[in-house]
Image: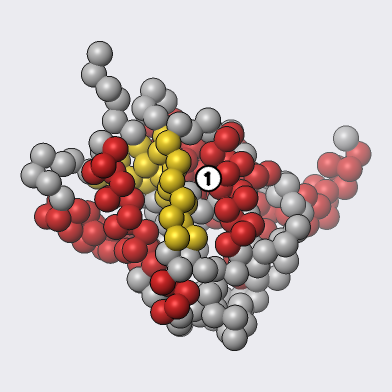
């Protein structure tokens, strides 16, 4: 019997990448999941790594790899990696936010494709979405298509690796709905830009996540009453 090619998923431990892993499992339930996590010196590094390990166990992923990309912290230029820069509490509007890590997704995708060549994977999944991060240049469809062309040019002639971004057009509420439909383990995810026992609830990532759960009409495991709204939270408490 021919060995089934693995599907690589870039898994940060956050909500989007976890739903992406659930999509990859749905797309090809008989193909092994290969989960790739990258530490790049972000302020939430320890907490994200903890979530990654728990989520990998949840999916019973047979292939797992964690890499150290601390060069991104040394390069700097982002409030996620620079201790002197404050993480914003809301999106700055039309400007590129300080939470943008310069060319991060290209670095991550390059590692994923390299690993794919070694283990024989033919798909690389990433959880980017344009509506919630439209000011990040490396989350756009044009960038993913361009990187896909680079993959075809820069790998062995018999290599066939395609990039998949199934959440690209979805808003956070749509991602939440899809995750609940697929049974994604939201209780294991970590979206906050800070580390700790609980999310800060104030950074832009926490705010976008909270709004997504509220609009989707589902409770966030970390802030169930806040995400459901007052009316729905009272109903929840009566159950």
Dividing the picture into quadrants, the one containing residue 89 is bottom right
- At which x and y percent is residue 125? 37, 46
Q: Quadrant of the N terminus?
A: top left
Q: Residue furthest right?
A: 238
Decide if residue 50 is on the left or right side of residue 153: right
The vertical placement of 37 against 93, above or below, is above
- Residue at mark 1: 18
Q: Secondary structure at mark 1?
A: helix
- Considering every residue shown, the one lying at the far top of the view is 1
Q: Is residue 167 above or below residue 119?
A: below
Q: Nearer the viewer, residue 217 or 162?
A: 162
Q: Quadrant of the image for the C terminus?
A: top right
- In the rendered image, residue 66, in percent from the top left (x then y), is placed at 46, 50
* Residue 159 percent coordinates (x, y): 16, 41
Q: Quadrant of residue 212?
A: bottom right
Judging depth in this view, the residue of 166 and 56 nearest the camera is 56
134 above or below 5? below
54 relative position to 112: left or right: right
Residue at position x 45%, y 31% in the image:
62
Q: Is residue 167 visible?
A: no
Residue at left offset 62%, top offset 50%: 50
Residue 182: x and y in percent read 54, 33
Can you tell which quarter of the image residue 74 is in?
bottom left
Most foreground residue, 217 or 172: 172
Q: Residue at x 15, y 50 (%)?
A: 155
Instruction: Give the residue drawn at x 32%, y 63%.
Output: 106
Q: How is the image coloured?
A: secondary structure
């Amino acid at each position: 019997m021919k060995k089934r090619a693995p599907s690589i998923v870039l898994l940060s431990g956050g909500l989007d990448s976890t739903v992406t892993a659930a999509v990859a499992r749905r797309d090809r339930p008989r193909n092994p999941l290969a989960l790739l996590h990258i530490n790049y010196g972000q302020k939430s590094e320890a907490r994200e790594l903890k979530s990654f390990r728990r989520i990998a166990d949840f999916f019973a992923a047979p292939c797992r790899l964690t890499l150290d990309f601390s060069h991104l912290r040394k390069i700097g230029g982002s409030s996620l990696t620079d201790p002197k820069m404050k993480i914003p509490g809301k999106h700055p509007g039309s400007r590129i936010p300080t939470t943008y890590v310069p060319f991060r997704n290209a670095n991550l995708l390059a590692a994923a494709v390299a690993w794919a060549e070694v283990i024989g994977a033919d798909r690389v999944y990433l959880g980017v979405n344009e509506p919630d991060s439209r000011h990040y240049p490396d989350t756009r469809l044009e960038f993913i298509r361009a990187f896909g062309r680079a993959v075809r040019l820069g790998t062995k002639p018999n290599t066939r690796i395609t990039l998949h971004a199934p959440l690209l057009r979805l808003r956070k509420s749509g991602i939440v709905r899809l995750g609940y439909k697929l049974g994604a383990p939201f209780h294991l995810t970590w979206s906050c830009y800070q580390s700790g026992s609980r999310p800060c609830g104030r950074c832009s990532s926490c705010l976008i996540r909270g709004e997504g759960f509220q609009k989707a009409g589902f409770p966030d495991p970390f802030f169930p009453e806040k995400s459901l709204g007052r009316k729905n939270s009272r109903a929840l408490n009566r159950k």
